[in-house]
Amino acid sequence: MANNILEDREKRYNRIVELLYKYNLPILCGKINYPGNNKNTKEAQIAFLVLKEYIEQEFKDIIIHSEILKGQDGQSIIGVLKTDPLEAKKRAVYIEERNKIGRIFDIDIYDNKGYPIERGSVGRDRRSCIICGKDTIECMRTNRHSKEEILSKINSIIMDNDIS
């Protein structure tokens, strides 16, 4: 299962590179941050539909191509954007910070050379831990929270219905 997830991630990145070569424009890749081996749960699918709707709404004026990828790594939406990559990242961060469910969205923007635009490039800090609010990297490195605790919190956010 873990190998299939890694293979799907590689396929997704290869598709991003193909689109970069074809269009020479920034690329958006949106997916759900969902821990564990099963990234296609009912909750993850609900969250992805919300993410997809938000992306389609926020980027409707600048998206010139989009597609959905499905696999063991969950669903993702990839879009080619006719805009400045920093402007696109600002819009992506807006979606991620818009409400509670945005905390589990992962929207990457790649410039036309294939480099990801970091949150710091648009004046935003790295994301904090969804459980305790501390540095996410530190929590992951020290296994501060169990996978079950994180999944429970994420599923609670998704099923909260406060996703307007």
Image (tube, rainbow, N blue to C red):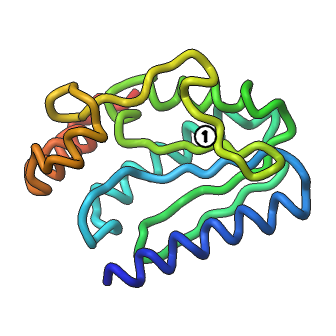
- The one of 114 and 105 positioned closer to us in this rendering: 114
Residue at the (42%, 28%) spot, across then down: 126
The answer to whether 72 appears left or right of 117 in the picture is left
So how many labels did they put on this image? 1
Among the 4 quarters of the image, the one containing residue 72: bottom left
Mark 1 burial class by Cα count in 10 Å: few <14, some 14-19, many 20+? many
Quadrant in the picture for the N terminus: bottom left
- The one of 142 and 102 positioned closer to us in this rendering: 142
- The one of 14 and 78 positioned closer to us in this rendering: 14
Q: Return the x and y of residue 90 as percentages of the image width and height.
A: 63, 24
Quadrant in the picture for the C terminus: top left
The answer to whether 70 appears left or right of 24 in the picture is left
Q: Is residue 142 above or below residue 94?
A: below
Among the 4 quarters of the image, the one containing residue 158: top left
The answer to whether 163 appears left or right of 98 in the picture is left
Residue at the (71%, 62%) spot, across then down: 16
Q: Return the x and y of residue 107 as percentages of the image width and height.
A: 54, 43
Q: Return the x and y of residue 11 as percentages of the image width and height.
A: 60, 75
Q: Is residue 23 above or below residue 4?
A: above
Among the 4 quarters of the image, the one containing residue 38: bottom left
Residue at the (55%, 37%) spot, across then down: 54
Hey, which residue is sitting farthest top in the picture? Answer: 123
- Mark 1 secondary-structure assignment: helix
Q: Is residue 29 above or below residue 111?
A: below
Residue corresponding to mark 1: 55
Residue at the (47%, 31%) spot, across then down: 96
Q: Amino acid at mark 1?
A: Ile
Q: Is residue 89 above or below residue 66?
A: above
